[in-house]
Image: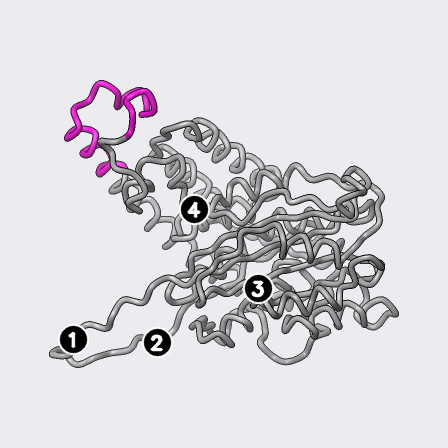
Amino acid sequence: MFNLIPTTLTLSATLALAGTIHTPSNAPPAPKREPRPIDLAICLDTSGSMQGLIDSARQGIWAIVNDLALAKPTPKLRVALLTFGNDGHAKENGWVVVQTDLTFDLDLVSQKMFALATNGGTELVGRVMQTSLDQLAWSNDQSAMKLIVVAGNESADQDQEVPFRAVCKRAIERGVMVNAIYCGNPNDDIAPAWREVAKLADGQFHAIDKDNGNIVIETPFDAQLQALSAQLNSTYLPFGDDGKRGWLNQTAQDRNAESASGQVVALRAMCKAGENYTNSTWDLVDACREQKVKLQDVPAAELPEKMRGMPIDEQQKLIGEMQTQRTAVQAQIQELGKKRDAAVAEEMKKRALDPTKSFDYAVRKAVREQARQRGMQIEEPASAPVPSTSKRDDC
């Protein structure tokens, strides 16, 4: 039984890598490719008319991350969130706020998104782009893909102090591509400046319907994915100063997803089962797996309470057990996720639904095209409702 909710938000695309390269049995194993960094700065207009965009971004973030997880090798994704055009921001900063710097902590990004509110405003596109370039800790890795996504519905050239054309030039000089998402009619008088933002910064232009362009399809798999997501949480071992904060925020973002729709719950669960969902700053299992800490160096007072009286070998055993349990649950989520994606694809096809006016589609389409240009492998089956890679920029 499927529930179609046309007035709510985001879309899970069926995305699966196709094809396996076979090598002779006596050939040496292929060298392991290192994960490629992707830095993604999302800049959202939070002026009074943009509640629809905020809602779309809140719910689309998990679809975007899940899409990137299909790249091979799986990238090391960091996301930043900036807002602009809100009268509640400081005028001296151009009404721009860095909600969070580039971070691996996707729960933090979700937390900041769900805390956003709209409020009047002057939308200075040049200023938010400049702030992204100057205040974010962009990767120094030469192979990194660095992207800005700026979304709004007013003229892109309002900023007379910091013209977007000059900022686009600076972005390209620093290897940062800018993707422009216009929340309006691609044929109106405002759209050309947004197209120019993308053109000048080697990015992609996309027009979306911020209020009515998103689709939710709920499936019978969503409740199972929600239960597995909760089960996954029980495998985390919070430690250090950030332990309690991170552990509580993980559950809080589960609740935020539940408040949106069953689809968002499912997409978040699928993200939590992927490589881009890492909590090594507060979870001992991730921290030890990624060799971010040495267990023997963690003060007893910073360990989970149940570990404080354990000998080191028992602590290591517990961490191993939690990793084993987590891997097993993640495998179940991944299997259910494939079934869910197939069900969504079938429902999309049956109802002839068009996802191309949604925020997450716009971001995924741009990132996919740019990843391919940089030599990353992101394949898609022809039957799936995934972002087109055609050169059209007004879809």
The mark that comes first in sequence, 4 or 3, is: 4
Q: Which comes sooner in the sequence, label 2 or label 3?
A: 2
Amino acid residing under circle 1: Pro
Q: Secondary structure at mark 2?
A: loop
**Are the residues flagged by discs 3 and 1 in contact, CB closer than 8 Å?**
no
All told, the count of numbered labels is: 4
Label 2 to label 1, Cα distance in Å? 20 Å
- Crowdedness near tag 1: few (<14), some (14–19) or many (≥20) residues, C-alpha within 10 Å: few
Instruction: Say which element carries label 1.
Output: loop
Q: Which residue is mark 2?
A: 19
> Which label was assigned to residue 272?
4
Amino acid carrying label 3: it is Arg
Q: CA distance from mark 4 to mark 3?
A: 19 Å
Residue 328: within the magenta?
A: no
Query: Which picture quadrant has residue 34?
Result: bottom left
Q: Residue 66 appears at what percent x and percent y?
A: 48, 56
The residue under label 3 is 364
Residue drawn at the location 81% of the way across and 69% of the way down: 191
Question: Which contiguous range is marked in magenta?
Answer: 298-322
Q: Quadrant of the C terminus?
A: bottom right
